Image: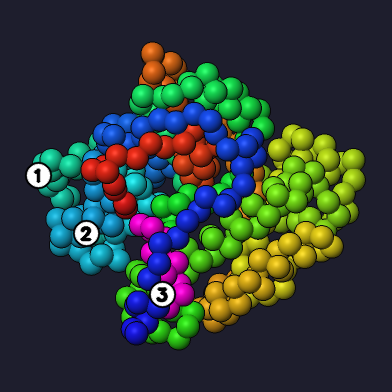
Amino acid sequence: MSSEQIFQKDWSFDHWHYLYGKPEASAYFKQRPEDFVVTENLGFELTGEGENLFLCIEKRELNTQQVCEYLAKFFKKRLRDIGYAGLKDKQSVSRQWFSVQMNVTQAPDLSDLDTENIKLIEYKRHNKKLKVGALASNHFKIVLNQVENINHVVQKLTLIQHNGVPNYFGTQRFGFKGNNLNWADRMSSGEVIKNKKIKGFALSASRSYLFNQVVSQRLQSNLYEQAQNGDVFILAGSNSYFQEPVSKAIQERLANHDIQLSGPLFGQGQLESGNDICKIEQQVANLHPKWIAMLQNNGLKQERRALSLYPSNITWQQNEDTLTLEFDLPTGCFATSVLRECVNFKVEQDNEHSD
């Protein structure tokens, strides 16, 4: 039996716990690209000069990598000369920024850049290349169609508006039917993965899965919302974290969302947590020793990620059995993690898509 046959399986993610209980409502989602509109907010001003041409592009039914490849070909550049801040879903209308490294004296003709699925919105020079994660936020406009039990969705949205949702990595991180995790199994069992893109997906997916496991376990153990001695706190809007005993001051900072509880992004180094929190995190790690070793051997460092996600500027409009939602999320967070708390997705056999 080949290694591909050994590790090829369909993964299920239904076991991850909910904050408000499994939703009773259902709806169709992403029936059209226009049902999922994402707009990036850079969060910084472009200088208007420099060796990088920033392009705000509206893409439709293309993934981010396909747009990068198109831009490299259009500008006759290497793929590594193209920068982007984050991956966006293929089955969407996404307005995202790209950077193209080029000499300051070049004045490229952009009149033929547009295609059927690519539309140039604006462009401007900047002095730095656009790097992954270099965003303030993403704005989402989502249409849910043929919603059953729509009042239940609205009730959940009201709860989410005040209390947020678990900050799970979305299932798209794991590939179609979790295939990125199959690559992680193969790689962690000694198979040499030469394709850097696949290797990156395997590392990212396995690390994200382990984080989600910790979040789910804390929900199950009623250790999700209340700070415990041994918790590691992360400063809101940053990657900085610290540990100290729970106090009134800590509780007030948590209530004000100045700091948040965190979970591990596994890698090299010791877990920063202690007591029962460390036990939960270590139990998850112990169930996947090959993945942990793979992450460490590939140089990933121990980091932390917030357990909770608080959508901002959340609004919704109801029109019969259609619900239109809008909200903003920090970079690296998933709209589907918001939706999973309030609605189950109906599936159409001819409407399966993956990035």
Determine whether the residue tagged by mark 3 lies in a helix, strand or loop. Answer: helix
Nearer the N terminus, badge 3 or badge 2? Answer: 3
Res 265 quadrant in image = bottom right
Q: Secondary structure at mark 2?
A: helix
- The residue drawn where x is 47% and y is 56% is 12
Front residue (pair 215, 330): 215
Residue at x 35%, y 74% (from the top left corner)? 196
Picture disc at residue 69: 2
Count of labels in the image: 3
Type of residue at label 2?
Answer: Glu
| Amino acid type indicated by mark 3 | Phe
| Vertical relation: 148 (above or below) 342 | above
Residue at mark 3 = 7
Q: What are the residue bounds of the magenta stretch?
A: 175-186
- 214 sits to left or right of 189: right
Write down the residue under mark 1: 112
